[in-house]
Image (cartoon, helix red, strand yellow):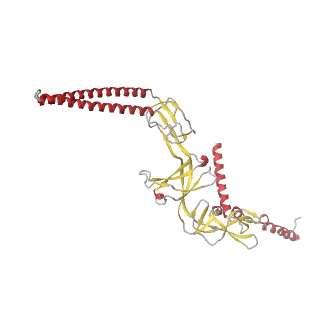
Amino acid sequence: MPIHKSRFPGIWILAIALLLPAAACFYANPETGREIHRREQPVPTVEIVEAKRGSLPIHEQLTGNVKALNQTGIYPEISGRIVEVLANNGDRVKRGDILVRLRDDELRERLTQARHDRDVAQAQLRQAEVSVQHYEAQLRRTREMVEFGLQSASELEALEADATRARASVDLARAQLSRAEARIEEQKSALQNTVVRAPISGILGNRNAEIGMRVDGGTRLFEIGDSSNIKITIIVTERQVNRFRQGNRARIRSPYLDKPVETTIRRLSPFLDPVTHTAVAEIELSNPGNILQPGMFVTVDVFHGAAEEAQILPKAALFEHPGNKRLGIYAAEPEAQSGKASVTFIPVEIATDNRDSISVRETGYRWVVVNGQHQLAEWNSREANVRIVDWDRVVQLQQLQARDLLKTINSSTAAR
């Protein structure tokens, strides 16, 4: 028998009464569209820091190439075949230490021949000098005979011509002797150059010398430098040449450094390369422990000038809202003595981007959230429990996170 609806009005009223509170326990997040249970939604706890007012120095991030101070290549002065290598990569040597020997048999023979030629030239010079002495003695006697009328003047003139030729022979012999002696010095120098020595004190690397190799003046045998002191070179564009100055503050960053190194630009070339239209700037640093090795690349932040005054925030305050994909910050207004604060997402425009901080043009707020933004966005919270943290602590955590990320990347790359 069908049941008439009017016979059970209380059942429908009871069902509606039970469903209404359950429906009231859920709502849709207008930013993400996800359904959230109100009774399970706690008030998020976030960390806030006090914003600053001021101007950040303008900086540009460049890549620097590390070289040892006075780093240079070692090349042979002459062509030849290597017969002995006395040094290796990583050896610390002093200036003048022997590194490589070249074959010298032929040069020793040339030196012996040059010395023989010198001996011949010396003999020819002595012979020419004796001839001059002979003609000069004859001239003295002939002049006396001419005075007494015992010989004619024409005989004296012929003898004077012979004496002049004898003197010229002496000059020629002396020139030949000088040339022979120069040839000896040349051969001695070439023989000395068969021994390749360290031009400076330092550590050797990039060995390119093996016994039996034939080398010439264009063959680099070693690289040498003192890596306890380094030089970092950076390529500067023509736009940057007009902005940078010698003495500008610079910051060196590398995953191998425990913390950034503050320094200055030591030299800046005023001349641009005619092809690339770039110049070279140099930074010099002490490198205890040889942490930065020649050939490495580092990040160099060069600071010049300052931006206009604006609101300064730690980079941790920046947050891309998942709902509207806009970049902004959560501004907080703490309530006195309650430990809570009302929070509002505010899109911002970055004026200056520094390594640890940013400056934004928007003003009108004192406190910003630096940790916990994801919870605020997920739950669409307008209120949060807040904990005030120190600015320096936030910056320190940012640096630690950046180093940990680089170590993770380097470890993954090495594992491959």
Q: Who is closer to the viewer here, 30 or 87?
A: 87
Residue furthest out toward the bottom: 336
Residue 310 found in image quarter: bottom right
Is residue 340 left or right of 355 when viewed as pictured?
right
Q: Position of residue 99 (x, y in %)?
A: 52, 35
Q: Position of residue 125 (x, y in %)?
A: 29, 28
Residue 16 found in image quarter: bottom right
Above or below residue 146? Residue 373 is: below
In the rendered view of the protein, which quadrant contains the C terminus? Answer: top right
Q: Position of residue 291 (x, y in %)?
A: 61, 47
Q: Is residue 80 visible?
A: yes
In the rendered view of the protein, which quadrant contains the N terminus? Answer: bottom right
Q: Position of residue 286 (x, y in %)?
A: 57, 50
Residue furthest out toward the front: 148
Q: Is residue 208 visible?
A: no
Is residue 324 left or right of 208 when viewed as pictured?
right
Q: Who is closer to the viewer here, 65 or 47?
A: 65
Above or below residue 12? Residue 80 is: above
**Residue at the location (66% across, 55% down)?**
401
Q: How many marks?
A: 0
Q: Who is closer to the viewer here, 344 or 273?
A: 273
Q: Who is closer to the viewer here, 400 or 71?
A: 71
